[in-house]
């Protein structure tokens, strides 16, 4: 009887394309107007800076932009240069973002002064709504998730008396409130979130329908306390053979997955079932628009932006010491704003955890697996995720399944023989360079997910700049989607 092949996690080796090991304390502060007038646009800025840049930051925020400090300065210690920082604003009731895609923003920490800007407008408040409003920004800094909370005072006075006053083009957020400096700023703090999760009794899950299965287990659509959710069952053998050890390892990883759920481009985590008398399960929110794979026919997808979202999510997974191991278009969901949401963490494991997933004949994501994961010692690292991301990018750009005419085992043999997915002439230079880098034989020659993220963001931003302009009605045109590639079936 043939023995099953076992995957083992290996330490993540350093990559020569990311030689910087500089670490530096990252300081965070929120600035903006301390008071808000009805229907008057305003900005909130989250500043990220090093200790020596405090004076420059304050001068820019106060003297140049007319803002005031809304939070006490806080810091995270020893943040490595190159760390991706994601900031997501929880927009309070009664306020609108002036650009719907700006609720989530990102930057790469290099030790330089940087700001993340959120432009909002009050919908108009009643007298009974007067008072302080909480603005909360969720920050994902590498593997750390924290919440920056600040308060702004809402005025309900109608500004009609100001309408006869000429408005300067240089007017700042505070120019319409002479008493702003007298407003007492409420204490605001940076709260680092603990690694916890909600334990869900399996009997409380109202299972509706089977969605699909993968190498890690089965997925079901269900309801939990009135909320539509997805339940992903996980084989207990993934965590070892001892009952206590299996439960402890699963509970630890469920807490980490809950941390992932705060990321703007990872599916929200609801809870987990760790009772060994029932199937081990992770429960996530249900996304009604479906997967990226199911929306290839849509001509409005900004593919560079979607892929950058997935790269950002994978950066956080790797920074936490985990690998996803199942990056594919079927596991990328699309939200209402056309942004990418990474899902299906059933095969996600901490690097260094012994055991791993069984790779059996004809099963598993073989068409997405790097060559080093297809042969002894069957090890996987973050660089194996980079290879899989290349396959995900390929199928997104070409709108076709990889190795469509081959069985998974046949595709794995081709990859071990040195063959890779073909790149047609219609690919842009940026996409060709990205795919070539991801598909390198030697894992250490593949780029980091931070490099991939930066490359895709630059490509996406250049698309915005190239297509920027006004339509006949004077409104800004949306950025053009990446040109759809002709569908193709690939057998070699």
Image: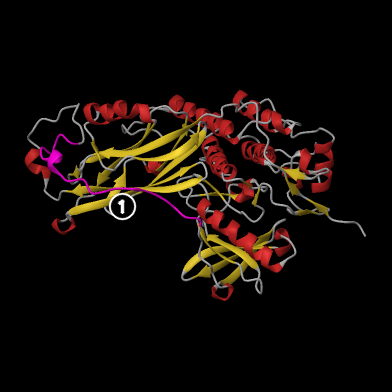
Q: Tell me where residue 250 sits by quadrant.
A: bottom right
Q: Is residue 44 visible?
A: no
Residue 444 x %, y %: 70, 31
Query: In this view of the protein, which residue sits in the foreground, 490 or 187?
Result: 187
Q: Which image quarter holds the C terminus?
A: top right
Q: Is residue 303 above or below residue 290?
A: above
Q: Is residue 222 visible?
A: yes
- What is the tally of numbered marks visible in this picture? 1
Q: Tell me where residue 249 sits by quadrant.
A: bottom right
Q: Which residues are magenta?
A: 174-195
Per the picture, the main secondary structure of the magenta-coloured stretch is loop
**Is 75 positioned to the left or the right of 351 in the image?**
left
> Residue at the location (61% across, 54% down)?
344
**Is 298 positioned to the left or the right of 420 in the image?**
left
Q: Is residue 251 above or below residue 434?
A: below
> Residue at the location (56% across, 34% down)?
450
**Is 299 positioned to the left or the right of 71 in the image?**
right
Residue 247 x %, y %: 64, 65
Identify the residue position indicated by label 1 in the image.
92
View extreme (right): residue: 1
Residue 182 x %, y %: 12, 42
Q: Is residue 282 in the magenta section?
A: no
> Residue at the location (75% across, 64% down)?
241
Q: Tell me where residue 173 sits by quadrant.
A: top left
Look at the numbered disc 1 and give the secondary structure of its residue: loop
The crowd level at tag 1 (other Cα within 10 Å; few <14, some 14-19, many 20+) is: few
Q: Is residue 269 above or below residue 374?
A: below
Residue 5 x %, y %: 83, 52
Query: In this view of the protein, which residue sits in the foreground, 45 or 22?
Result: 22
Q: Is residue 56 above or below residue 1?
A: above
> Residue at the location (54% across, 58% down)?
255
Q: Which image quarter holds the N terminus?
A: bottom right
């Amino acid at each position: 009887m043939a023995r099953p092949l076992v995957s083992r996690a290996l330490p993540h080796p350093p990559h020569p394309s990311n030689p910087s090991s500089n670490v530096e304390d990252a300081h965070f502060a929120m600035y903006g107007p301390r008071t808000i007038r009805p229907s008057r646009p305003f900005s909130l800025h989250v500043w990220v800076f090093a200790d020596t840049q405090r004076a420059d930051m304050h001068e820019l925020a106060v003297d140049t932009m007319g803002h005031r400090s809304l939070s006490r300065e806080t810091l995270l210690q020893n943040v490595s240069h190159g760390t991706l920082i994601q900031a997501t604003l929880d927009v309070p009731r009664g306020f609108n973002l002036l650009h719907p895609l700006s609720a989530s923003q990102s930057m790469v920490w290099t030790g330089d002064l940087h700001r993340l800007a959120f432009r909002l407008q009050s919908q108009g408040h009643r007298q009974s709504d007067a008072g302080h409003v909480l603005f909360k920004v969720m920050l994902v800094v590498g593997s750390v998730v924290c919440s920056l909370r600040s308060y702004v005072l809402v005025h309900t006075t109608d500004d009609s008396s100001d309408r006869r006053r000429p408005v300067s083009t240089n007017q700042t957020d505070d120019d319409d409130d002479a008493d702003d400096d007298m407003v007492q700023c409420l204490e605001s703090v940076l709260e680092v979130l603990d690694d916890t999760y909600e334990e869900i009794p399996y009997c409380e899950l109202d299972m509706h329908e089977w969605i699909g299965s993968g190498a890690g287990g089965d997925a079901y659509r269900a309801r939990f306390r009135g909320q539509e959710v997805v339940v992903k069952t996980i084989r207990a053998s993934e965590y070892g053979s001892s009952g206590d050890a299996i439960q402890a390892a699963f509970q630890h990883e469920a807490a980490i997955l809950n941390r992932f759920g705060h990321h703007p481009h990872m599916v929200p985590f609801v809870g987990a079932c760790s009772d060994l008398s029932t199937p081990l399960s992770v429960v996530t929110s249900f996304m009604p628009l479906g997967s990226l794979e199911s929306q290839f026919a849509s001509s409005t997808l900004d593919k560079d932006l979607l892929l950058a979202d997935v790269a950002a999510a994978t950066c956080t997974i790797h920074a936490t010491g985990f690998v996803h191991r199942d990056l594919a278009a079927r596991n990328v969901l699309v939200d209402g704003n056309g942004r990418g949401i990474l899902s299906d963490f059933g095969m996600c494991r901490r690097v260094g955890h012994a055991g791993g997933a069984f790779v059996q004949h004809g099963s598993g994501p073989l068409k997405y697996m790097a060559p080093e994961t297809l042969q002894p010692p069957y090890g996987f690292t973050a660089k194996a995720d980079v290879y899989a991301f290349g396959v995900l990018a390929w199928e997104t750009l070409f709108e076709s399944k990889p190795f469509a005419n081959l069985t998974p085992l046949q595709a794995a043999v081709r990859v071990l023989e040195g063959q890779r997915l073909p790149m047609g002439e219609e690919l842009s230079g940026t996409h060709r360079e990205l795919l070539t880098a991801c598909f390198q034989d030697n894992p250490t020659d593949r780029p980091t997910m931070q490099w991939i993220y930066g490359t895709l963001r630059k490509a996406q931003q250049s698309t915005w700049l190239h297509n920027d302009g006004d339509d006949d009605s004077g409104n800004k045109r949306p950025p053009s989607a990446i040109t759809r590639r002709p569908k193709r079936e690939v057998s070699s």
